[in-house]
Amino acid sequence: MSETSSPQITQLLHDWRGGDQHALERLTPVVYEELHRMAKRYMARERDGHTLQTTALINEVYLRLVKAKEVEWQDRAHFFAVSAQLMRRILTDFARSRGYQKRGAGAHQVPLEEAFTVSAEPSVDLVALEQALTRLGETDARKSKVVELRFFGGMTVEETAEVLQISAETVMRDWSMARAWLQRELDTGVRHGG
């Protein structure tokens, strides 16, 4: 994420929150490139033949952001964290609507460790990951947020630390522990039929 545009984005978010609809018009082109990068990075992990396109994902995120009038935008980092969360929800809802959760529905099983790397290869079952991540969030919300921001949002360790207001070392520790926990959960689910 571009640090040079951080004050501009933050100001536009504050103006938009204050009711200036023109601020949203000025904000859109400023954040579009970063939203596109986030969506493209995530979509690269999806299986071949995925019918949801990067642009459609961005458009859906944008529509939901525009409707999110109750959000008290804090800054650029908060905006992209919310965007990452929306991408997670949209992609999971899309997977559910297409029935991909039914016994994997042809999903290519890849170890979670591999799924956390940027790759054009198909990834873990998104619905199973969503369910495991929700369970993780019930026991450790911060670790769940770290995974959401890094995996779904494509954020770096430093960006994640900025959003969560913790150290980069804490992000790395949470990231490592969360991946191990999620892998165990996903392995257990596969062994028990989902």
Image (cartoon, grey):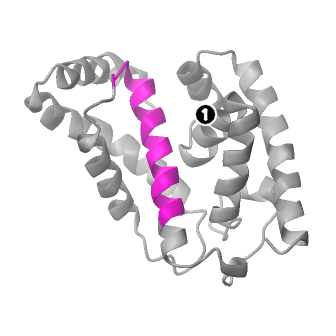
Q: Position of residue 11 (x, y in %)?
A: 25, 17
Q: Which region shows up in magenta? A: 72-93
Q: Mark 1 highlights which residue?
A: 156
Task: Please tell me in which quadrant of the rendered image residue 150 appears.
Answer: top right
Q: Quadrant of residue 174?
A: top right
Q: Is residue 27 left or right of residue 106?
A: left
Q: Residue at x 75, y 20 (%)?
A: 170
- SS of the residue at dot 1? loop
Q: Nearer the viewer, residue 41 or 183?
A: 183
In this view, the residue in front, 115 or 189, is: 189
Answer left or right for 112 relative to 34: right
- In the drawing, does residue 9 fall left or right of residue 171? left
Image coords of residue 43 (percent x, y) = 52, 62
Task: Confirm whether the magenta stretch covers residue 114.
Answer: no
The percent position of residue 159, horizontal first and vertical second, equals 56, 27
- The image position of residue 102, as x and y in percent, is 66, 79
Quarter of the figure that contains the C terminus: bottom right
| Residue at image point 85% right, 45% down | 181
Q: Is residue 65 visible?
A: yes
**Residue 45 vertical placement versus 157 (above, below):** below
